[in-house]
Image: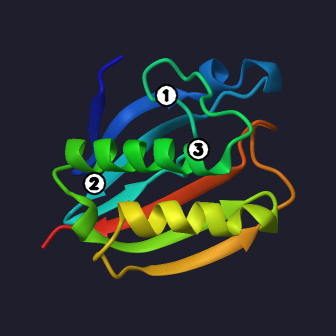
Amino acid sequence: MSDEITVGGHRRLRPFNTANTYPEQRLSNDLCQAVVAGNTVYLRGQVAQDLDTRESVAVGDAAAQTHKICDNIELLLSEAGASPEHIVSCHVYITDVRYREDVYRVLGERMNGVFYVSTGLVVSALARPEWLVEVTVTAVIA
């Protein structure tokens, strides 16, 4: 499958099916990592997973997971023709409030000077038990 699909004038980057990502869950949903609709870029919730191999990384380390998430965000934005300064909104999901300081410290370092709006949530779990952090991003290309 191609790394990009265009439907309705919108570009869908890195399409995949959840049957490959979550085989233990017996799902089959066609998704993608990013959608470019006009000048807006919507990123799927990013976790500490290699985008090419789907391997989970930095298991047990919220700060290291957040660095990997930021790497993924930067890569996907680049593939969409955007960069971190185009980020306008960010939702941060953590599985334990004790991770908050580490996660937000990394986000502050990696997105310094961006001044996006943010919502932080503590959730009971993410799609895989080894994932401690998930971040969704919306960016607007001027």
Mark 3: which secondary structure?
Answer: helix
Note whether 81 is above or below 57 in the view shown: below
In front of the other: 33 or 73: 73
Toward the left, the furthest residue is 142
Distance in Å between CA atoms under marks 2 and 1:
21 Å
Crowd class of label 3 (few under 14; some 14 to 19; many from 20; radius 10 Å): many
Circle 3 residue: 65
Going from the N terminus, do you reach mark 1 or mark 3 first? 1
Residue at 40%, 64% (x, y): give it: 109
- Quick check: 82 left or right of 109? left
Q: Nearer the viewer, mark 2 or mark 3?
A: 3
Which mark, by number, is residue 84? Answer: none
**Amino acid type at image mark 1:** Asp
Crowd class of label 2 (few under 14; some 14 to 19; many from 20; radius 10 Å): many
In front of the other: 114 or 30: 114
Residue at 45%, 39% (x, y): give it: 32
Circle 1 residue: 50
Mark 1: which secondary structure?
Answer: loop
Circle 2 residue: 36
Figure quadrant of the N terminus = top left
**Amino acid type at image mark 2:** Val
**Amino acid type at image mark 3:** Gln
x, y percent for residue 141: 17, 67
- Quick check: 66 left or right of 122? left
Mark 2: which secondary structure?
Answer: strand
Toward the right, the furthest residue is 124
Q: Label 3 near label 1: C-beta < 8 Å? A: no
